[in-house]
Image: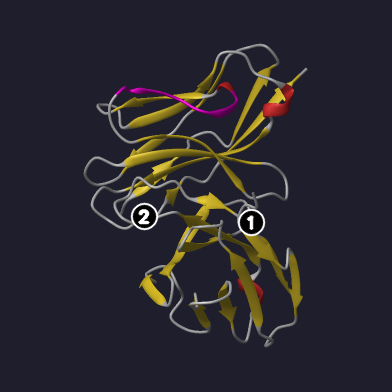
Amino acid sequence: AQSVAQPEDQVNVAEGNPLTVKCTYSVSGNPYLFWYVQYPNRGLQFLLKYITGDNLVKGSYGFEAEFNKSQTSFHLKKPSALVSDSALYFCAAVPSGGYNKLIFGAGTRLAVHP
Amino acid sequence: NAGVMQNPRHLVRRRGQEARLRCSPMKGHSHVYWYRQLPEEGLKFMVYLQKENIIDESGMPKERFSAEFPKEGPSILRIQQVVRGDSAAYFCASSLTGSGTTETQYFGPGTRLLVL
């Protein structure tokens, strides 16, 4: 079965420190990869996506993600965390050649402490 | 510049009643997707629709659930004879096109269904 894994339920970071939220995937072909963020009682907001090309993708709010094909990973990063980054982050994948059907990870809660 | 609209935002139903969830896609978008998020879990795909057509309903339960996206008006997700296990957040997303798999999906705020 195709799946996306986010191995950490929660990540705690001090404000100003770099942050990484991990994501690995097990999806057929060359998948397209996405990161979304969810604030309490809100919908998901699109952060960034990887389709092809440069392995480092830059997105909204200073976030970036690095695609690593050999490790089947797509980790989300930010050089300097803000308290306002505290939210639930979802990694998602779309298998190539299929309909635009997102396969989501279970989510990682990011807590940035002042 | 309205995004994806969903209503109601919160819906309470008793077991056996019907739930109707509505989704209006972003302006110009003609592709709609429904996802369900159970407590403490990620989102699970339910159905993908274009205007007047169901393209992929592989994630929909076989019974009690149906979806439509008429030529005019919002997309509707309908749950008949709700049970407590249907309690979840239901999210709608839309995209400009559905061709290929690179289109970004934009999500609505969700409808939180509680079945008593």
Above or below — where is A110 with respect to B116? above
State which region is magenta. A54-61
For residue A70, side relative to residue B29 (left or right): left
Which mark identifies residue B39?
Answer: 1
What number of labels is visible? 2
Q: Residue at x 50, y 28 (%)?
A: A59
Q: Is residue A36 magenta?
A: no
Task: Locate residue A52, reporting x and y percent.
Answer: 28, 32
Q: Residue at x 52, y 80 (%)?
A: B65
Closer to the camera in the image, A94 or A106: A94
- Badge 1 sits on which subunit? B
**Residue matched to label 2:** A100
Q: How crowded is mark 2: few (under 14 residues within 10 Å), some or many (20 or more)?
A: many
Residue A74 visible, this orientation: yes
Horizontal side of B62 relative to A36 (left or right) equals: left
Residue drawn at 44 percent across, 39 percent down:
A34
- At label 1, counting other C-alpha atoms closer than 10 Å, the crowd grade (few under 14, some 14-19, many 20 or more) is few
Q: Which amino acid does label 1 sit on?
A: Pro
Residue B28, how many percent across, how many down?
50, 57
- Element marked by disc 1: loop
Q: In this view, does B111 lie above or below B63?
A: above
Q: Which of A100 and A111 is in front in this view?
A: A100
Is A51 left or right of A112, judged from the image as shown? Answer: left
- For badge 2, the amino acid type reads Asn
Tell me, yes or no, whether dots 1 and 2 are on the same chain. Answer: no
Residue B99: % across, % down: 31, 55
Say whether residue B42 is visible: no
Quadrant containing the C terminus of chain B in the rendered view: bottom right
Which colour scheme appears in the figure? secondary structure
> Residue A71, image x and y in percent?
29, 27
Rendering quarter of residue B17: bottom right
Look at the numbered discs 1 and 2 and tell me whether their residues touch, using CB distance below 8 Å. no
